[in-house]
Image (spheres, rainbow, N blue to C red):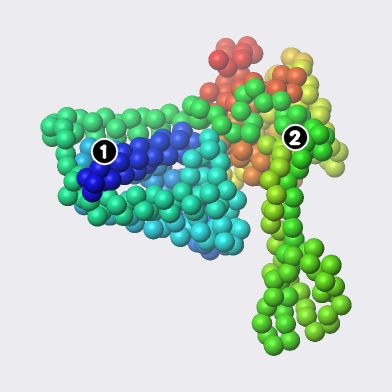
Amino acid sequence: MKNLLTQISRVLVGGLFIFSGVIKMNDPVGFAFKLEEYFGEDVLNLPFLQPWALHLAVFLVVLEVMLGVFLLLGCFKRFTLWSLAGMMAFFTFLTFYSAYFNKVTDCGCFGDAIPLTPWESFSKDVVLSVLIAVLIWGQTHIRIWLPIRINQAKMAGTLLFCALFTNHVLSHGPVWDFRAYKPGTDVLVAMKSAEELGLEAPKYETYFTLSAPDGSRVEVSGTAYIEEKWYERSDYSIVEDGTYSKKIAEGYEPPIHDFAIVINGEDRTEEFVAAPQVLWLIAYDFSKANMKELERLVGELNIHVQKSSVKVVGMTSSSDEEIAALVAKTGCRFPWAVMDGTALKTVQRSNPGVTLLQDGIVQKHWHFNDAIFLKDSNLVWPE
């Protein structure tokens, strides 16, 4: 029985770590964004780690895959088991903290492929922790079952795959696109609310934290606050930083939200979404962008504006002053919209990058390494 439980746990943990690692390896930039959220001042308060988020993301996803392979092969048993235990102890704490304090709404455990709520993430980590405990308990039954040379070849091959695959997606974007703006998405439809689609919307409740006369604190839902007339109790006061909103019933939520193309105070979203052909030049943050490539793309897209009917719009979360400096330097002939940086990171992982829409439907995303619109002074569409 002990051997059977150990082998079942070995396959489940090893397979899940490899699957989870590869899914995040497909989009390490997206995983890095999630780590930046965790390192923020309102979560773990480790802002000094945010500049290293991408490096940590790559390291963690490669480590995750390698630990899964080590476990299945039976190699480096002590290192593997205690590394797995350490990782799960940390992530179980992190997901509980996020769920309990409602800090990060999606852990990013499986990237955008399988979104999990904080409590689902925590439950998954608890189950994995139990399985790893079983592995440590039955570690004498974890044995190498292939010749050493074959194991070495498999480990080397896995590491080479991780290096090549990670380099490819960092240079060209995700191979499998699970984002809200993936090709084939009708943006205007994906922005419609549950009410517009005739569906049931999720329900939220506001919770207030009240300070009692004796110094203790009481948490009251917004409904109870009104029905029980807590507002008439002058000896109770609302604690400002203790008010929060919580989902109490599931429902349809539009996959695309917080997205509006506003230029000089005018909402031009439909114009730059529903046009027959439109190119979005996205550089979510000029201070972190490859400015040489951004200036090149502005120059090439200027010619598109002059010689074709394709609409072009720039999108960034950078300041008006930074946009004005870019326009002055490049002679930019198309407008720029200042937008929500998080939304832009969801659209385009490359900074800068270009997205093509036709009749409101996303057709393709190009990393700046692939977005070359001029060839021998002639306009071309990148393949």
Residue at 75 percent across and 34 percent down: it is: 191
Disc 1 is placed on an element classified as helix
Residue under numbered circle 1: 72
Secondary structure category for the residue under label 2: loop
| Residue 293 is at least partly visible in this image | no
Q: Position of residue 27 (x, y in %)?
A: 49, 36
Q: Residue at x 35, y 34 (%)?
A: 162
Q: Quadrant of residue 285?
A: top right
Whichever of labels 1 and 2 marks the residue nearer the N terminus, that label is 1
| Residue sitting nearer the eye, 214 or 186 | 214
Inspect the image, locate mark 2, and give the three-letter code of the amino acid beneath it. Met
In the image: residue 300, left or right of residue 259 = left
- Residue that sits furthest to the bottom in the current view: 214
Determine whether, in the image, residue 213 is placed left or right of residue 87.
right
Q: For the C terminus, give its image quadrant.
A: top right
The residue located at (78%, 24%) in the rendering is: 274
Residue 340 x %, y %: 70, 44
Residue 163 locus on image (x, y percent)? 35, 34
What residue sits right under mark 2 in the picture? 191
Answer with the quarter of the image where residue 214 lies: bottom right
Q: Nearer the viewer, mark 1 or mark 2?
A: 1
